[in-house]
Amino acid sequence: MSLKLYNTMTRKKEDFIPREQGKVAIYACGPTTYNFFHLGNARMFVVFDTVRRYLQYKGYKVTYVQNFTDIDDKIINRAKEEGMDALALAEKYIQEYFKDADALNIQRADIHPKATEHISLMIEMIETLVAKGLAYAVDGDVYFEVRKFAEYGKLSGRDPDDLRSGARVEVDTRKKDPLDFALWKGAKEGEPSWESPWGKGRPGWHIECSAMALKYLGPGFDIHGGGGDLTFPHHENEIAQAEGYLSAQPFAHYWMHNGFITVNQEKMSKSLGNFFTVRDILAKFPASVVRFYLIGTQYRSPLDFDDQKLAMSKKALDRLINTCALSKEALARSVEDASCAKAESIIAQAQQAEKAFIEAMDDDFNTALALAALFDLSKDTNNFLADYVPCTEGQRALEFVLGTFDKLSGILGIDLENMENVQDDHLVDGLMQLIISIRAQARQNKDWPTADKIRDGIKELGIVLEDTPQGVRWKRQ
Ligand SMILES: [Zn+2]
């Protein structure tokens, strides 16, 4: 079976046919670097990292580009709040991005272009759009003229006339049409700015991605990815600019969008107070568990988040880790002069698991079903180990099974064999709960020397205790 993926542009699953045989070019919209990235961003980065890994497993040479939007209104506003230089703030959060992304085992892109390093390219594109009559300048700003691009709305399936009448559009008399969007924004006092034919200013967000994608991947590249909320207007505008600039289509062949994340079934938003950065979540759960949770659902489905769901993910992941640990333990035992009647069948089961895994991933990257194949293999392996007597052919079979786990979990970005830390965390947490209760007991008995000894001892280990309404909690410093 060949790989099929859902193309937002055509609204159906299509066979994946690359532009160039054996090669895949992917552009994924990167973060606007004004804060730590949030759980919704994390889902997108993990989804496309997994897509990339699977395409590599299929033998494609993948070129993966993910930008940094390091100049934007949000960055400028945040920098003002913090009394910081906007570009320095953006650079700080680029570095913070890498910390969280590395923790989540998101591979570095082949190219991580920054918008501010491609300003002249954006200016050149905007000049071409103006020269072609697709854009116009007003008072130092430049707008894309949506009416001139006949196919506007083709990605999101929106009718421009509906958008015009339905939208509560701000009246901007300088624009020819309410849907026209900024390609270039004239500089305001105190903002970072660059010289341009229209005076000092900075690019609009949409043109940044079009320019960087075309520079590194060329027209008609294979996959453009992003969160579903980017379909309109961001990606619609990217298409209008890029295809207007190229006088040809398509800008990108397949448009992939992941579903959104809700928290306790509600939309995640700052105003509702249920907004989580990955940094917040990593303080409570191992990164491998967070990644495992994010890929536990097919990427287009909505995904609901709460602590309990992460706790369940942790338990599920522990099951796979335990199977691998038990297999390794069995491999370390000395071989007896025995024969193993089940060696052939466990190898067949591992091969079957890989087949099921591939079928799931070939069907629009269904990671949920792919994981189910791993759990089937885990069950089979546990059965195999139940009455296992180490022998030569049995050990060979176990090595094959472990190799299969390693290969398949690697595609999902989960390392089952080097995850003792997950189990350790479980153990540490249990021990800490015990210590906390002994300290509470000592305090109750007014045994201050013991209570103090515990407090000082764990402090030296870099652990702090916090009194919360739910009791004493511990965390690493
Ligand atoms: Zn983008």
Image (spheres, rainbow, N blue to C red):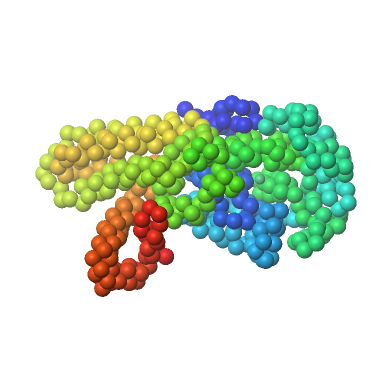
Horizontal side of 383 relative to 139 (left or right) equals: left
Q: Nearer the viewer, residue 155 or 174?
A: 174
Most extreme residue toward the bottom, as rendered? 449
Q: Can residue 52 be seen in this view?
A: no
Q: Which residue is drawn at 57% across and 30% down?
A: 6
Q: Where is residue 396 in the image (x, y as percent from the top left)?
A: 24, 43
Horizontal side of 116 relative to 434 (left or right) equals: right
Q: In this view, does 374 lie above or below 138?
A: above
Q: Where is residue 135 in the image (x, y as percent from the top left)?
A: 84, 43
Q: Can residue 193 be seen in this view?
A: yes
Q: Residue at x 51, y 33 (%)?
A: 301
Task: Count how many numbered circles sit on residues in the image.
Answer: 0
Q: In which quarter of the image is the C terminus?
A: bottom left
Q: Residue at x 87, y 39 (%)?
A: 176
Q: Which of 453 and 212 is in front in this view?
A: 453
Horizontal side of 458 relative to 157 (left or right) equals: left
Q: Is residue 433 above or below residue 343?
A: below
Q: Which residue is drawn at 33% across and 50% down?
A: 417
Q: Nearer the viewer, residue 71 or 438?
A: 438
Quadrant assignment for ligand 1: top right
Q: Nearer the viewer, residue 210 or 86?
A: 86
Q: Where is residue 110 in the image (x, y as percent from the top left)?
A: 57, 52
Q: Position of residue 39 (x, y in %)?
A: 52, 47
Image quadrant where residue 190 sits: bottom right
